[in-house]
Amino acid sequence: MAELTDHQTPHLRRSLGLWNLLIYGIVLIQPTAPMPVFGIVNNQARGHVVTTLLIGMVAMLFTAISYVRMASAYPSAGSAYTYASRELHPIMGYVTGWAMLMEYVFSPLICVIWCSKALQNIVAVLPYWAAAVFFALLFTVLNLRGIRTSGKINEGLAAAMAIVIAVFFLAAFKYLLHHAPHSASFYTNPFYDAATFSPSALFSGTSIAVLTYMGFDGITTLSEEAKDPRHDILRATVLVCVITGVLASMEVYAAQLIWPRGETFSSQTVDTAYAYVAGRAGGPGLFHLINSTLLLANIGSGMGAQLASARLLYGMGKGKAIPEKIFGVLEPRRRIPANNVLLIGAVALIGACAISYARGAELLNFGAFVAFMGVNAAAFARDLRSENRRRLLPLISSLLGFAICLFLWWNLSVQAKLFGTVCLGVAVAYAAHASRGFRKGVVQFEASVQD
């Protein structure tokens, strides 16, 4: 914090340049982001994982631009809920806020699932349910004790992941040098293989693959700390999406060459498929290195996502969107929403025992797509009403972002769309009840997950 005089109000120091913002975004998304979903997308898209990631990158780029434009309009209250509420309608904001909650809640759930499967790769005799209980309790207990990873630790982990990725690329190169055929088609099949290509399968896989990019919008929350927020926030957000897309595509391209078309993953190996690919390329040592690296990454992500979910519930409780006496209270000593941490831990455990990683990822993306559509629609509405409404490029960008997210949302499984729609329907019904048929206005809540 900057030093204050008697005539100053507290403000954040503008100390973050473009490089700092890029590092923050890459750490937030993680360099290994495509690895946990590789097997699921490979099976779903019939081997076209690279193509799904490139399509997903385009979708996220348009949405990223909308996020940046809205963050510049609301620099101190940035959230999809705020944008949709103020630019569209409070009811639309309310739906967007609940969609955000779905995204946050299912994130620790899928981390529990993945960590449990990864631990079974190390301790094969351990039952899955026991591993799920262990990780759900681990996330919950550490969060209740106020233990968090610092920014320096997260940066160190990201650097370690980058080294592990480099080791994998070296092993992949050596493996392909001795085992890959010399035909040109072998090297283009990961992008397009006529023998297995299916548009419906491709877009269904893409609707899951975009999980790779989740977290890019976190950069927009740093507008008040950036040296040049007007230019650097946009540049950093777009560059992080592009860097993530390029690196992720390289990672899965190498994996698809090692594990070519026609070889799907079994139900036992699909969630941790990338570790098995690494094992084929570099033997048991690389298998365990990749498996352990992703395990640590998912533990960190699961802990952070659980606390973020708890904070979002706290904000909703304080705003009386849900019962304040339960959700809007803090544990006095550590100032943590303990009730919410416990609830999210219970949901993660029950969900991990009830659904697959793929279904959890789809439900997370259901919420994310609805929130993204809200942001794109808000940006479109704002540009339409502004003095610069004759500038077509911003309007087209936000419209394309909305349309692509809607299309990918539509390609989620029927079960995910049904369950997600029911959840949002219950939320709207509660809002209608609390506002007496919306006559008193929609219940408001602050969606910030910050301290």
Image (tube, rainbow, N blue to C red):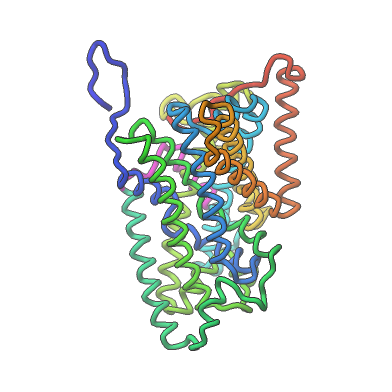
Residue lying at 46% horizontally and 43% vertically, measured from the top left: 304
Where in the figure is residue 54, as x and y percent of width and height?
Answer: 53, 60
The single residue placed furthest to the top in the displayed view is 6
* Residue 313, visible in the rendered structure: no
As drawn, 170 above or below 85: below
Where in the figure is residue 315, as x and y percent of width and height?
Answer: 54, 27
* Residue 264, visible in the rendered structure: yes
Where in the figure is residue 223, as x and y percent of width and height?
Answer: 39, 33
Question: In terms of image quadrants, where is residue 45?
Answer: bottom right
Q: Is residue 56 magenta?
A: no
| Part of the protein shown in magenta | 135-152
Q: Is 225 on the left-hand or right-hand side of 5? A: right
Quarter of the image that includes the C terminus: top left
The count of marks equals 0
Q: Main secondary structure of the magenta part?
A: helix
Question: In terms of image quadrants, where is residue 430?
Answer: top right
Q: 325 and 49: which one is in front?
A: 49
As drawn, 325 above or below 355: above
Q: 84 and 145: which one is in front?
A: 84
The single residue placed furthest to the front in the displayed view is 390
Quarter of the image that includes the N terminus: top left
Residue lying at 44% horizontally and 24% vertically, measured from the top left: 332
Where in the figure is residue 91, as x and y percent of width and height?
Answer: 67, 26
As drawn, 60 above or below 263: above
Q: Is 325 on the left-hand or right-hand side of 276? A: right
Question: In terms of image quadrants, where is residue 437?
Answer: top right
Residue lying at 56% horizontally and 78% vertically, measured from the top left: 260
